[in-house]
Amino acid sequence: MFLSERSAQAEYFDAPERTASELRAHYAWLQRINRITRFERPFRVWLPRLLPESTCRSMSVLDIGAGEGELGRTLTAWAAGRGWEWRFTDLDLSAHACNRNPNLRVTVGSATLLPFPDGHFDAVIASTMTHHLGSEEDVVRHFQEAARVSRGAVLICDMQRSVLFLAMLWALLRACRAPREFRNDGLLSVRRGWRAAEWRRLAKEAGLDSARVWTEHSAHILLSYRRPS
């Protein structure tokens, strides 16, 4: 059955030989599509539900796979509009992305081996990052590491591997006249994406027995986890 299994094909822009100019163009297109799809919405909706208001008023957040830091800037501005202070630390495997990130708290590092002590952040998030990981073992380690460095909540969001979402994204990228390489990578990201049953199984393997996994709008798959008090 189509999309019954996750693709193992590597994405074009994940290759180390991509030039700085290619990556700049890639991130510019990514920011454009993120704004259109309101990529920050799951975090605006769910973080205040996962954490008490006293924490939301002033909290530290780690964004894993932050790229150039657009998600953190967007959520910081949204929180400020509510009178809250959200302080983001951004982590990405790409030194190029980190060098272009204006956040002073930015670190080059891996989602499977976070360079932070246990319970260092009030919340740990990741947006459309998990599908870049190469194996289920990497995903298990990613879940474990996110939970380890959080003292409050973990919220991970990625693309759902579904025919409907693949068709929706294809139409959006064609309508936006996205470049061929970016368009192909976007569709491959869906084919490398996940299904809820897979994440539930991997969360249990990671020891996150109380994690909740669900899908939204045939597009997103989400995992939330609260550290036991």
Image: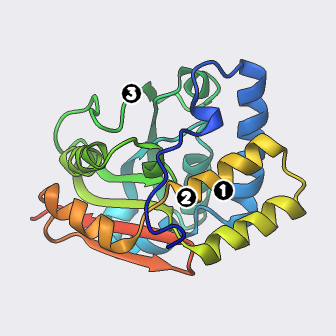
Marks 1 and 3, how far apart in space? 26 Å
Coordinates of residue 94 in the picture (x, y in percent): 53, 26
The residue at 72%/48% (across/down) is: 184
Give the left or right position of residue 144, taking residue 14 as reference.
left
The answer, for residue 226, to whether it is visible in the render is no
Disc 2 versus disc 3: distance between alpha carbons?
25 Å
Horizontal side, residue 195 vs residue 212: left or right: right
Find residue 104 and name its label: none
- Position of residue 20 relative to residue 13, above or below, is above
Front disc: 1 or 3:
1
Instruction: Please give left or right for residue 207 compared with residue 18 in the image.
Output: left
Q: Is residue 203 above or below residue 103?
A: below
**Disc marking residue 109:** 3
Q: Earlier in the sequence, mark 1 or mark 3?
A: 3
Circles 2 and 3: CB atoms closer than 8 Å: no
* Circle 3 Cα neighbour tier, 10 Å, few/some/many (<14 / 14–19 / ≥20): some
Could you tell me how far apart the alpha carbons at marks 2 and 1 are, in whole angstroms? 7 Å
Q: Quadrant of residue 68?
A: top right
Query: Which x, y percent locates residue 117?
Result: 19, 34
Q: From the image, tell me which residue sits under label 1.
A: 187
Residue at image position (60%, 47%) is 73
Q: Which mark is residue 191?
A: 2
Residue type, numbered disc 2: Arg
- Residue 14 is at least partly visible in this image: yes
The furthest residue to the bottom = 217
* Mark 2 vs 1: CB contact within 8 A: yes
Residue density around tag 1, few if under 14, some if 14–19, many if 20 or more, within 10 Å: some
Residue at point 26% right, 52% down? 143
Which badge, 2 or 3, comes first in the chain's sequence?
A: 3
